[in-house]
């Protein structure tokens, strides 16, 4: 799972979750889609605190998700991941 960083009033908070599943043949983590959080501001901030320690410089997927799903400026790679 990858956290999409929020923008505007949600800057610095989780805006959505990018989901992946392991390919049984290759073992790669493959991007399968995104979902909104449905969380209020306080819940988003709390989620951000818990996931920030899992931050990594690139998405955990074998191939980068579409830029439209990642959000943020083109080339943005900030993410948090959880297993």
Image (cartoon, rainbow, N blue to C red):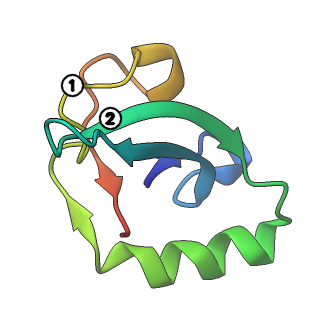
Quadrant of the rendered image containing residue 47: bottom right
- Left or right? Give the position of 31 relative to 58: right
Which residue is drawn at the image coordinates 49% and 31% (left, top)? 32
Pick the residue in front: 17 or 5: 17
The answer to whether residue 81 is above or below residue 52 is above
- Identify the residue at image location x=28%, y=39%: 23
- CA distance for labels 1 and 2: 7 Å
Give the crowd class for mark 2: few <14, some 14-19, many >=20 residues within 10 Å: some
* Residue furthest to the front: 25
Q: Are marks 1 and 2 in contact (CB under 8 Å)?
A: yes
Decide which of 10, 50 is in the foreground and name it: 50
Residue 8 visible? The answer is yes
At 13% from the left and 36% from the top, the residue drawn is: 26
Secondary element at image label 1:
loop
Q: Provide the residue designation for mark 1.
A: 63
The tag earlier along the polypeptide, 1 or 2, is 2
Which quarter of the rendering shows the C terminus?
Answer: bottom left
> Residue 20 appears at what percent x and percent y?
42, 44
**Residue 71 visible in rendering:** no
Q: Residue 48 location in percent, x, y?
A: 52, 72
Q: How many marks?
A: 2
Q: Is residue 82 above or below residue 5?
A: below
Q: Is residue 78 left or right of residue 8?
A: left
Residue 16 drawn above or below residue 42? above
**Numbered tag placed on residue 5 in the rendering:** none
Counting from the top left corner in percent of width and height, residue 37 is at 74, 54
Residue tagged by mark 2? Answer: 30
Q: Nearer the viewer, mark 1 or mark 2?
A: 2
User: Which residue lies at the image location 28% right of the left edge and 31% below the top edge?
Assistant: 76
User: Could you tell me which secondary element the residue under label 2 belongs to?
Assistant: strand
């Amino acid at each position: 799972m990858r956290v999409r960083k929020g923008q505007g009033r949600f800057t610095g908070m989780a805006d959505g979750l990018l989901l992946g599943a392991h390919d049984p043949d290759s073992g790669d983590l493959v991007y399968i889609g995104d979902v909104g959080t449905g969380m209020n501001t306080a819940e988003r901030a709390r989620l951000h605190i818990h996931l920030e320690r899992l931050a990594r410089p690139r998405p955990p997927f074998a191939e980068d998700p579409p830029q439209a799903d990642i959000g943020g400026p083109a080339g943005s790679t900030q993410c948090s991941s959880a297993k």
